[in-house]
Image (cartoon, grey):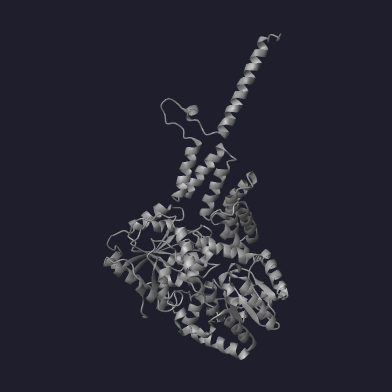
Amino acid sequence: MPRRRESGEADLDARVTNMLAQRQFRADRRQAPLDPNHFRRGTGPRMKTFDELLRAASDQERRGDYEKAALGYRQLLRIRPNSVKVIGQLGIARSTQGRFEEALEQFDKVAALDPNLADNHNNRGLCLFWLDRYEEAALAFRRAWELDPDLPYVLGNHVYLLRGTCRWEGIEELTQRLIQAVRKGHHAVSPLFFMQFSDDPADLLACARKTASQISAAPRPRRPPSGKNGRIRLAYLSADYRDHAAAHCIAELIERHDRSRFEVIAISTGPDDKSAVRARVKAAFDQFIDVSRETSDAIAQRVSSMGVDILVDQMGHSNGNRMGVFALRPAPIQANYLGFACTTGATFIDYIIVDPFIVPPDQQRFFTEKLVHLPDCYWPYDTRHAVPDRRPTRTECGLPERGFVFASFNSTTKLTPEIFDIWMRLLKAVPGSVLWQASGDRAIQKNLGSEAAARGVDRERIVFAPVIPLLEHLARLPLADLMLDTLPWNAHTTASQALWMNLPIITCPGRSFHSRVAGSMLLAVGMPDLIAGSLEEYEALARALATEPDRLREVRDRLAKNRLVMPLFDTDRYRRHLEAAYETMVEIWLRGEPPRSISVDPI
């Protein structure tokens, strides 16, 4: 028969039961959705549930209000510190803002809590990539692909980083699989990354359209021009008004714009890095508006209320883009210019600024934008760089004092095994020569050295050029004898810098915009003989220039003269042509006509 409890024992049991109940209640608060009835006070507003708060933060993120979204996620993590979903969303919000270190910290937490989430490994890989930690990024993408081969974009990210880190085993098979996935309409790769693998204009259009189709577009606005004193109100939107190639290229153009005909505005969506080029660009615009913390909706509203006539996108599908702003149609004329060497595939971008070499008129069918052909080269250049008087020596740059120096300052993401085969054959054919390749990543250096050794070339014959400040980089360029271009993605910024510093470059154009830029520059600087018709001609031309000193000397002497008189570096001529294109766009709009192809006559 059970023993009768004494009153003191009953009181103890009651206290223990009450304590356990309170402990369980606190545990339930951490683990389950919030029950608003626990917190109801009279007739006041009820507390929102965890899921409602999460939806609110997610909605703020979708609208582009990343700061409020991040605040919401952090509040939710006080309730559920180990919520994989919330931690991951906070990481996505931070990475979208370009705060990759903070984002990576969140994705690492998710990986520790659940190591088998493919999308989290993919997000980690993207952060690592933008932090220039390529080898780690490659491993993250590979893990994501192994966990879920059908995850959107993961195959493209995986293959892209294999290419970029020069881990080429099996890459041809994966590249073909990627191209087939694009042709089947899958979300296999971002349009930016896909340009590394294809110069087929139909495939590039299909890839861009697939990505652009995820963005809902507003109808085209109809309103009269609203520029001050009859001027066209022209706004450039970019996340790269900082120490970045885009800012360096456009600085002099902005300074030279004709203020009697144009009011020129910057819509800056990226961070302020406090650099000299940021300050210069900021001073060059009539208005410099920092909207880096604003939502896409708010930016579009601001652009519309300002009465912008032409809104120029300098981002396309590149990192940090604000395609959502353009989808809202805040300006009656919207153009793709300079930052994305491909069609956006978007119905809400009216024009793309090109030239007849990079995009011949018969390729209009591969662009959702109407082609605007400038008469020379579409690429601007800043001729006001103050290159240091003192030039480094070859020894200071790790180069041999004697011997031919082939150079490539393209990223290794543009380097293919086929192109590298050619370069290694050139080193074998030219005794004492070296390849001067841009890369500061030790893992890439090791991998590329192994690829050279596998082709019978001493790995010491590849000299790696670290990333250094722009003006120091320009000063070292003349130490090379000949720059070698890549395919399918040509040199763009690096080609213009080489030609400005009198370093010849040879190229082999492909079939699409991004694979024809160096050729366009060579035509505009009067050096068509450096454009090869095939990779066989490219290799033969490089060998001839490396083994025939008189021929190379003639090329360099001609380039030294041409760069001062030919159109490529005539920024004011370039400015006149671009402004004529803008004025034609406005004239078409004022007549109530839809956008059409434009060909600007030389002025």
Residue 260 place in picture, x, y as percent: 32, 71
Please indicate whether residue 562 sits to the left or right of residue 121 in the image: left
> Which of 470/223 is in front?
223
Q: Which quadrant of the figure contains the C terminus?
A: bottom left
Residue under the image location 63 percent in, 57 percent down:
142
Which residue is most to the bottom?
550
> Which of 500/151 is in front?
151
Q: How many marks?
A: 0
Residue 360 picture quarter: bottom left
Please indicate whether residue 602 sits to the left or right of residue 452 in the image: left
- Figure check: 569 above or below 286: below
Please indicate whether residue 227 sits to the left or right of residue 100 in the image: left
Residue under the image location 66 percent in, 82 percent down:
404
- Figure check: 563 above or below 168: below
Residue 511 place in picture, x, y as percent: 49, 74
Residue under the image location 68 percent in, 65 percent down:
442
Residue 99 place in picture, x, y as percent: 55, 54
Q: Which quadrant of the figure contains the N terminus?
A: top right
Residue 573 place in picture, x, y as percent: 40, 79
Please indicate whether residue 369 sits to the left or right of residue 420 in the image: left
In this orientation, does residue 102 appear?
no
